[in-house]
């Protein structure tokens, strides 16, 4: 994982906690409407993959226990982890590419409803991603995977009729520097990082056809999500995946779906239109997209303001804003592993660690998110904007709302550290919150595709009978229950009947 060179250590300081009365009068714990859905509070658990699905993409009991545990804290909304829209093997990530996934997803909806007493709304983040290979053994790559071309023969000064085996033998004899001279940039990337498809690979028919293929795939997935009982859809237009790559300034497709901002936003708008048609006008649909890609040549805040206005004008019910998380600057993975888009500087911007620079890890995306919200409002639209990135204190969250920088506040790692953050703060027990240390222990587990847990709770009370444990047998999979000192003190105030965006 990348760390800024300044290596300044920061500590999360949540500030003052409100009394129950103060919380009840706060903006944070007031309702908000996202189109047809009203959240009881402006608190939001952004999507986080916990690595608990089966190898073939089904919901497990561990998934159900995980989301039910978050729902016990009663955030306004939870966004279910990135869930694949295609019916293709994708490892232990949830999928929604076929009807057979619907019953499992419905179990999650029911569990969240029950655990939150019907209060927490559940959205699902739906995603498409392109092919990526693991970093290969160099010998295997040069002997088997690399397609030998005339270019290699010429670069190695071999005769045109030299057999492939001779070319491979010559390549195998080269050191890293020699290979860097002979291999084309994408071949070198395939060797060093693992081959990765891009939306600009127009020579690949399945990539060229993405604008025709994706709208119906997203629409079918959205219809299944509605059938499963989710309260809404979050289209995953952020980070390193297909839709974000269409929005990227690096997208120079020449088929009308790249180049200018208008071209780059075209497919995301067409996907939204197809989804809207599939789920109807009375269903919440929004997207998560990037305020800034934070990579050389990538989209900037100005691009994001343009996209935000386009999405709002098209009728999206919310805009959730993230930052960075790209493959372009990811670190070289270990042999046999795939590149992980949160290991470079842009990954740092997405999930900043407590070792940081002068700006610190708390709120690196606040100003950019505020700029998007302002652009949307200046266009005469009132689409609610969700902010995230380093939020852990009540006063910090309240200020974001009071200053008009956001309408809903996302707490990702904060809720992983303590899913009861919301119920504790709301009931005047803020001092009982386990504040996230921003060590990124969770993110390191995510990188290794291990069940995500938090170091603040995963070794506590391991002797408890019936505890669900990680595959390595060392960690509990959900945090211990929290009981308020008295039932009366923990009672969450009744919500106001009306909501405003
Ligand atoms: C373990 C883990 C998994 C994540 N998975 C997703 C995901 O599936 N989709 C997504 O948009 N963001 C994902 N994120 C990013 C978070 O939603 C959030 O944007 C980021 O952690 C910054 O917010 P925070 O400072 O409140 O944690 C993940 C983060 C973590 C720590």
Image (cartoon, grey):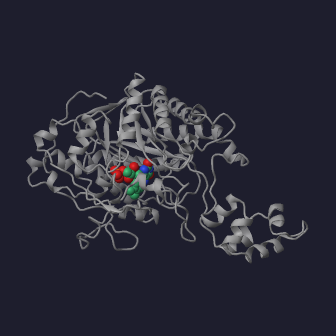
**Image quadrant for the C terminus?**
top left
Q: Nearer the viewer, residue 3 or 209?
A: 3
Query: In which quadrant of the rendered view does residue 169 lie?
Result: bottom right
Q: Position of residue 233 (x, y in %)?
A: 44, 39
- The image shows residue 281, relative to residue 468, as above or below, that is above
Seen at 68% across and 58% down, the residue is 186
Q: Is residue 107 visible?
A: no
The furthest residue to the top: 380
- The image shows residue 75, relative to residue 153, as above or below, that is above
Seen at 69% across and 66% down, the residue is 180
Q: Position of residue 328 (x, y in %)?
A: 56, 54
Q: Position of residue 172 (x, y in %)?
A: 73, 76
The furthest residue to the bottom: 173
Relative horizontal placement of residue 354, taking residue 208 as reference (left or right): left
- The image shows residue 185, relative to residue 198, as above or below, that is below
Q: Nearer the viewer, residue 393 or 235?
A: 393
Q: Position of residue 449 (x, y in %)?
A: 46, 64
């Amino acid at each position: 994982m990348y760390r800024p060179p300044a290596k300044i250590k920061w500590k999360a300081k949540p500030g003052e906690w409100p009394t129950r009365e103060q919380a009840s009068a706060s903006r944070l714990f007031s309702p908000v409407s996202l189109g047809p859905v009203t959240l009881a509070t402006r608190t939001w658990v952004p999507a986080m993959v916990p690595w608990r699905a089966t190898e073939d993409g089904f919901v497990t009991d561990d998934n159900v226990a995980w989301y039910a545990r978050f729902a016990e804290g009663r955030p306004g909304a939870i966004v279910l982890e990135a869930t694949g829209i295609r019916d293709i093997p994708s490892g232990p990530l949830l999928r929604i590419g076929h009807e057979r996934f619907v019953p499992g997803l419905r179990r999650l909806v029911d569990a969240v409803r029950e655990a939150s007493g019907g209060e927490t709304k559940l959205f699902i983040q739906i995603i498409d991603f392109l092919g990526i290979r693991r970093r290969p053994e160099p010998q295997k790559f040069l002997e088997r995977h690399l397609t030998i071309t005339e270019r290699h023969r010429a670069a190695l000064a071999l005769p045109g009729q030299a057999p492939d085996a001779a070319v491979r033998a010559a390549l195998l004899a080269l050191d890293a520097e020699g290979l860097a001279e002979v291999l084309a940039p994408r071949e070198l990337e395939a060797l060093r990082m693992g081959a990765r498809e891009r939306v600009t690979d127009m020579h690949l028919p399945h990539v060229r056809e993405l604008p025709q293929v994706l709208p119906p795939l997203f629409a079918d997935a959205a219809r299944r999500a509605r059938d499963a009982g989710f309260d809404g859809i979050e289209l995953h237009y952020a980070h390193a995946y297909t839709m974000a790559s269409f929005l990227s300034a690096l997208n120079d497709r020449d088929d009308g779906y790249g180049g200018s901002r208008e071209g780059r936003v075209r497919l995301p708008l067409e996907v939204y239109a197809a989804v809207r048609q599939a789920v109807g006008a009375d269903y919440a649909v929004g997207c998560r997209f990037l305020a800034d890609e934070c990579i050389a040549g990538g989209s900037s805040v100005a691009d994001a303001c343009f996209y935000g206005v386009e999405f709002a004008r098209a009728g999206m019910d919310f805009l959730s804003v993230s930052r960075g998380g790209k493959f372009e600057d990811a670190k070289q993975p270990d042999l046999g592993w795939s590149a992980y888009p949160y290991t470079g500087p842009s990954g740092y911007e997405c999930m900043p660690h407590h070792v940081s620079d002068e700006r610190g890890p708390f709120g690196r995306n606040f100003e950019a998110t505020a700029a998007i919200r302002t652009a949307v409002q200046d266009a005469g639209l009132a689409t609610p904007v969700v902010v995230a990135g380093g939020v852990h204190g009540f006063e910090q969250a309240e200020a974001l709302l009071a200053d008009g920088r956001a309408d809903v506040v996302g707490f990702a790692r904060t809720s992983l550290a303590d899913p009861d953050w919301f119920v504790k703060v709301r009931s005047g027990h803020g001092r009982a919150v386990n504040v996230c240390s921003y060590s990124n222990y969770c993110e390191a587990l995510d990188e290794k595709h291990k069940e995500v847990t938090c170091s603040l709770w995963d070794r506590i009370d391991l002797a408890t009978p019936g505890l669900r444990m990680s595959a390595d047998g060392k960690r509990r999979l959900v945090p211990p229950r929290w009981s308020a000192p008295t039932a009366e003190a923990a009672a969450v105030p009744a919500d106001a009947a009306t909501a405003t965006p």
